[in-house]
């Protein structure tokens, strides 16, 4: 069961490059009495397990030892979630916040998920007009709610969860809902600088991301060549099982054309993830990909969208033991090619 212990909030101003950080003199604690704001933040805390889909890991010290200043601030806060310890995290965020990023609201949400400690660090943009009403040394709940409500769906967040504060909290997950569709690197500001972390692409996560990009590219493209190449690559993806690849590698190793590779890369939320390497898991890929294929000993290779396969192809069983079938399909010819291989 997910439960919240504390929620702290701070107004964060751009101070990157400045010698001293002076803002957020007074933060605020959000309690269940602040019903509307508390409930919204509670929803973010609960949903973070689903929303934060980019796996990250804290960087080790330059000498290779397991030491990371941001992780230390976060684990100290989880151990004793109070305003002074929360303020240190806010100060760190402020020191990496540029004028381009602008003013923001930082919420630290600390609690438990069963026996595991959970903390969500989230930043929301602050509206300049509302900010003008902010009084020195006073961060009221009314003010927080007004700013938050205007930007409640545009936020950056990082989720950390572990049973052990000493040995855990090295890996986490992040999201940046402020940059989708803009091609801006999430890593430069939120991941690499503030959190002092790197991307961690597991086999399952990398394979799932690849499959999603292929699925979206095939559905969104109006180019029949692109659709055909993706279908062929998906059908023959089994040869990559167990290999360490990146999404870019998948395109080149499958013999895809430049335009098809570009169509796939356009469907990745964070472009830098196209270079991350991961172990290709065939079972995960087949669970995520929308295509279903059937290869016959005659050399025929039948492929269609998994949801429509049985509608596209009518299969009659001729000999169940020998797995002999008769397959028919009816439709208008949209394209026809003759080539040396199945993959262009």
Image: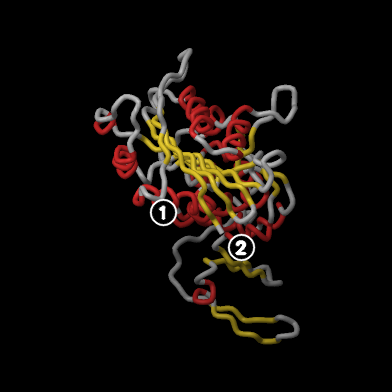
Q: Which is more foreground, mark 2 or mark 1?
A: 2
Residue 250 drawn at (x, y percent)? 63, 46
Q: Quadrant of residue 18?
A: top left
* Label 2 CA crowd tier, 10 Å (few <14, some 14–19, many 20+): few
Q: Residue at x 41, y 25 (%)?
A: 25
Residue 204 in the image: x percent, y percent? 65, 52
Rendered residue at 47%/60% (across/down)? 335
Residue 244, placed above or below residue 94: below
Q: 216 above or below 248?
A: below
Residue closer to the observer: 294 or 220: 220
Q: Position of residue 325 (x, y in %)?
A: 65, 81
Q: Is residue 149 left or right of residue 183?
A: left
Q: Residue furthest top?
A: 19
Q: In the rendered view of the protein, which quadrant contains the N terminus?
A: bottom right
Q: Are marks 2 and 1 in contact (CB under 8 Å)?
A: no
Q: Nearest the camera: 295 or 58?
A: 58
The residue at 35%/33% (across/down) is 139
User: To which residue does mark 2 refer?
Assistant: 287
Q: Which residue is denoted by mark 1 in the rendering?
A: 222
Name the element at disc 1. Answer: loop
Q: CA distance from mark 2 to mark 1?
A: 25 Å
Residue that appears at 46% across and 55% down: 224
């Amino acid at each position: 069961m997910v439960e919240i212990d504390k929620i702290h909030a701070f107004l964060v101003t751009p101070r990157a490059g400045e010698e001293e950080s002076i803002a957020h003199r007074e933060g605020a604690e959000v309690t269940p009495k602040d019903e509307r704001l508390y409930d919204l933040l509670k929803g973010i805390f609960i949903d973070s397990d689903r929303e934060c889909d980019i796996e990250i890991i804290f960087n080790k010290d330059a000498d290779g030892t397991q030491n990371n200043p941001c992780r230390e601030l976060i684990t100290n806060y989880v151990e004793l979630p109070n305003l002074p310890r929360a303020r240190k995290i806010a100060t760190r965020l402020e020191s990496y916040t540029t004028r381009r990023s602008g003013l923001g609201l930082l919420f630290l949400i600390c609690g438990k998920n069963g026996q595991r400690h959970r903390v969500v660090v989230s930043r929301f943009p602050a509206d300049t007009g509302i900010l003008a009403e902010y009084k020195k040394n006073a961060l009221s709940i009314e003010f927080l709610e007004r700013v938050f409500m205007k930007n409640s769906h545009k936020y950056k967040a990082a989720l950390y969860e572990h049973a052990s504060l000493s040995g855990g909290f090295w890996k986490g997950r992040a999201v940046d809902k402020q940059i989708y569709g803009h091609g801006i690197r999430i890593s430069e500001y939120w991941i690499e600088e503030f959190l002092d972390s790197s991307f961690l692409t597991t086999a399952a996560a990398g394979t799932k991301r690849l499959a999603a990009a292929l699925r979206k590219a095939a559905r969104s493209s109006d180019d029949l060549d692109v659709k055909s190449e993706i279908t062929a690559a998906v059908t023959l993806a089994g040869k990559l099982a167990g290999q360490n690849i990146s999404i870019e590698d998948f395109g080149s190793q499958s013999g895809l054309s430049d335009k098809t590779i570009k169509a796939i890369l356009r469907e990745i939320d964070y472009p830098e993830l196209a270079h991350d390497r991961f172990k290709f898991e065939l079972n995960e890929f087949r669970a995520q990909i929308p295509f279903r294929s059937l290869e016959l000993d005659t050399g025929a290779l039948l492929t269609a969208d998994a949801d429509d396969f049985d509608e596209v192809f009518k299969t009659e069983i001729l000999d169940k033991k020998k797995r002999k079938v008769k397959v028919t399909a009816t439709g208008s010819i949209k394209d026809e090619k003759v080539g040396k291989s199945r993959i262009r």
